[in-house]
Amino acid sequence: MATRALLIQSRRHFSNGAIQNVTMVGGGLMGSGIAQVAAQAGNNVTILEVGQEQLKNAQNIIGQSLGRVAKRLHKDDPNAANKFIEETTSRIQGVTDLARSVENSDLVVEAVVENMELKHKIFKELDEAAPQKTLFASNTSSLSIAEIGSVVQRKDRFGGLHFFNPVPVMRLLEVIRTPDTSEQTHQTLMRWGKSIGKTCVTCKDTPGFIVNRLLVPYLAEAARMLERGDATAEDIDTAMKLGAGHPMGPLELLDYTGLDTGVFIMEGWHRKYPDNPLFKPVELQKKLVAQGRLGRKSGRGFYDYRKL
Ligand code: 3HC
């Protein structure tokens, strides 16, 4: 990642409009990454999780990633690197009580599993507990923002903030507005995104927004290409890295983001838009998921990571 963007992320007391206190609902890989970049930019971040074990996991993810960022920012100055890690960590706290997590919150970002019922339950409770001023956003990668926000009263203060994995490295943030999102909310979310070092783009509330709408069908076609026996996994990935300049080949990227995630997104879209051939789930990918080959996180996907 460009050092300039890292520096922006790590700049303290950077003006980010009205937002200073951020509540991160869900401390998985994406939630931890979002919490980290917000804290690096000087926000106070409260991570809400279901238990201490999950909070510990978030702390570990953030600790490892902060170590990498600190190394890059202060490679010749271990004292400055440690100070950076300590200061950023001190701005992050973990809680398991929903009402407490939003007491002083300016912005809530939700990044729990892609389950509409669960998101509705959480946002209903948040809507009752949070101050009126608090803005709400979901980091969903495939569900409709308007549908997620349908359960809250504050529809004008609800939008989408879609980050990319790994959050501390990827420079893009998609800021999604529904027909109900107010201009003021949208502008505040755009300003906040910029203040945490991201380049923001806007998209309507459409399936996959910009990146996933293009990326998911491309990744699926790479899996179909392998399924048809057109080329080997290694050659498909090499081709896209060297021929198209991508940092990862499509099958490597599917392993990185999780084959189960890919299948889940495609199945959801296919159910909603059965006539769109781009959204047709890939049999090979479904078969690998059924075998527990989910990608890097399970040790095996298209590739075998167990010996690495
Ligand atoms: N935290 C902090 N720093 C990290 C990091 C993390 N989690 N992961 C990597 N880095 C840093 C490394 O420390 C390294 O820094 P250095 O150059 O100072 O040593 C730098 O990033 C490069 O990392 P690596 O040397 O380990 O490996 P690569 O050069 O192969 O880069 C990569 C890794 C950044 C993941 C790169 O391969 C890449 O950009 N891949 C594509 C990722 C992508 O497409 N993401 C989007 C997925 S779609 C999505 O998220 C949408 C969702 O809805 C599913």
Image (cartoon, rainbow, N blue to C red):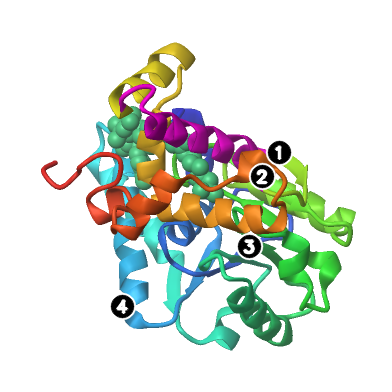
Q: Residues within 10 Å of mark 1 (few under 14, many from 20)?
A: some
Mark 4 residue type: Glu
**C-alpha span from label 1 to label 3:** 22 Å
Q: Is residue 16 left or right of residue 63?
A: right
| 252 part of magenta stretch | no
Which residue matches tag 1? 201
**x then y, percent, for residue 265:** 56, 54
**C-alpha span from label 2 to label 1:** 5 Å
Is label 4 within 8 A of ligand 1 (CB to nearest ligand atom)?
no
> As rendered, which of 54 and 215 lies closer to the eye?
215
Mark 3 residue type: Gln
**Quadrant position of the C terminus in the picture:** top left
Residues drawn in magenta:
208-232
Element on which disc 4 rests: helix
**Relative to 179, does residue 279 appear above or below in the rendering?**
above
| 231 part of magenta stretch | yes
Instruction: State whether the magenta stretch is mostly helix, strand or loop.
Output: helix
